[in-house]
Image (cartoon, coloured by chain):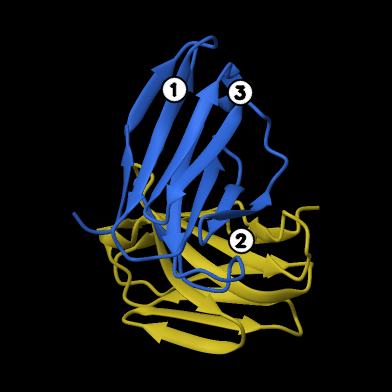
Chain colours: A yellow, B blue
Amino acid sequence: KNEVEQSPQNLTAQEGEFITINCSYSVGISALHWLQQHPGGGIVSLFMLSSGKKKHGRLIATINIQEKHSSLHITASHPRDSAVYICAVVSLKTSYDKVIFGPGTSLSVIP
Amino acid sequence: ETGVTQTPRHLVMGMTNKKSLKCEQHLGHNAMYWYKQSAKKPLELMFVYNFKEQTENNSVPSRFSPECPNSSHLFLHLHTLQPEDSALYLCASSQGGAVGTDTQYFGPGTRLTVL
């Protein structure tokens, strides 16, 4: 079982729909990141969370430390939101593999 | 130029070649990172330089050799690679400090193909 899992793996939505992407993890963490990767490879950091909720434009990220779960919500989705969304956790390990990435969720928003 | 740049954007090399990937950041950051993204696999952190000191090494094979001559430049020297090393190699930078505790800014990546 991977230490960081995301669901769904793939998601297709109609423009305007409300979208939720989930991330669950099995290790103790100090922070969690949401990243967006566009076709071609470029990655943009969306949020860094250690508790509660953050909002930026149409994007909202929440985290529940006790349940080891985070969600990324996109309101009023748009085709330009089509990308792979990656969850990454900063574990409490002191070894080299403390940053653990999820497998990503591929989102396609259709006009 | 602004942000994080990487060159080359695409590289095809044979298993006996030696090549280098270059990353440059214009953000005044103190930490720089190399990541590997293989097809169908999650991102993997390869190397971290914090204030020019390598602080973490992910037990990456020695055929990958990082170099950080100053806080703005990062290189990844490649030699005797294997076809399974074909991947997207991403550079990132951040203000610095404990890994993962601040926002990282990514370059566009170098798509490497090893024949």
- Residue occupied by mark 2: A7
Rendered location of residue B112, percent (x, y): 44, 27
- Tell which residue pokes out farthest to the bottom in this image: A52
The mark lying in front, picked from 1 and 3, is 1
Question: The residue marked by circle 2 belongs to what chain?
Answer: A
Query: Mark 1 is on which residue type?
Result: Lys
Quadrant for the C terminus of chain A, please.
bottom left
Label 1 and label 3 in one chain: yes
Q: CA distance from mark 2 to mark 1?
A: 38 Å
In the picture, the disc for residue B84 is: 3
Mark 3 is surrounded, within 10 Å at the Cα level, by few (under 14), some (14 to 19) or many (20 or more) other residues, namely few
Name the residue rendered at 67%, 37% in the picture. Answer: B60
Callout 2: 10 Å neighbours few (<14), some, many (20+)? some
Asked where in the image residue B46 lies, by quadrant, the reply is top right
- A72 or B73, nearer to the observer: B73
Q: Residue at x 34, y 49 (%)?
A: B24
SS for callout 3: helix
- Quadrant in the rendering for residue B109: top left
Nearer-N-terminus badge (1/3): 1
Query: Which of these two is toward me, A45 or A107?
Result: A45
Q: CA distance from mark 1 to mark 3?
A: 16 Å
